[in-house]
Image (cartoon, rainbow, N blue to C red):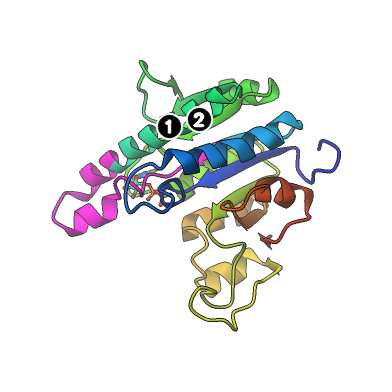
Amino acid sequence: APANFRYKRVLLKVSGEVLMGDQSFGVDMATVDTVAKAVAQVAAEGVEICLVIGGGNIFRGLSKAAAGMERAQADYMGMLATIMNALAMQSALEKIGVSTRVQSAIPMAAIAEPYIRRRALRHLEKGRVVIFAAGVGAPFFTTDSGAALRAAEMGCDALLKGTSVDGVYTADPKKDPTATRYETLTYQDVLAKDLRVMDASAIAMMRDTGIPIVVFSIREDDSLRRTLTGEGTFTVIK
Ligand code: UDP
């Protein structure tokens, strides 16, 4: 890994909710810019970084299925939402001089590369930030599963989950002042206690591949860098 950093190559999962900032819907470009800056900072220092972007700020399959739409159809709409977010993130990164590629699990030739594993690896080796869109490309999955899958395929040293809280707590720290943060957890703890860090299928995949999950707050400046150097506050699941 580059000097001072714990990991050489990482995958950062950013959920749609993070990108909407304080809005109740859609993409807040100021927030996207903040995330882009954090990514640019570590990329400039030599960390190879790829992103998986969620879509829940625009469309979530499950909730539309509950309202009567066929689940698979609703999930395809959700995947399209992740492509919009990926383009917003690409735009924010390119604006500050970071070379990027978007690869979509659902081919959409006019706006993104199709997902090709070896090509994505080559981009990372060249220092480009690769943004993976459309999750795994299949309904009944989520972008958490997409993040786990791509982290494994890219041979990442860690899967970083950027949230609005700086780790996993014993209770919701926004509601319970006595809640304490776990320094480390095992994959099995997370599954058995149903801690809802990520989908169970994503946790199971990281357990099977041995890639640690690092949960941290992406809302504070510098927190991505501080997480990667080990100075910040976060929870490691391993
Ligand atoms: N989705 C899917 N397959 C995937 C990834 C996403 O069907 O591999 C759909 C699903 O409907 C999901 C929506 O896309 O609700 C948005 O993704 P997600 O909920 O994971 O976004 P996030 O919670 O990270 O914002």
Task: Say what amino acid the circle numbered 2 marks.
Answer: Ala
**The C terminus lies in which quarter of the figure?**
bottom right
Q: Is 17 on the left-hand or right-hand side of 186? A: left
Residue 43 tag number: none
Quadrant in which residue 96 is drawn: top right
Which stretch did the figure color magenta?
51-77
Circle 1: element type: helix
Q: Residue at x 60, y 21 (%)?
A: 99
- The crowd level at tag 2 (other Cα within 10 Å; few <14, some 14-19, many 20+) is many
- The answer to whether residue 116 is above or below residue 78 is above
Q: Residue at x 76, y 43 (%)?
A: 7
Label 2 belongs to which residue? 92
Residue most extreme to the bottom: 178
Task: Say what amino acid the circle numbered 1 marks.
Answer: Ala
Label 1 belongs to which residue? 88
Q: Is residue 66 magenta?
A: yes
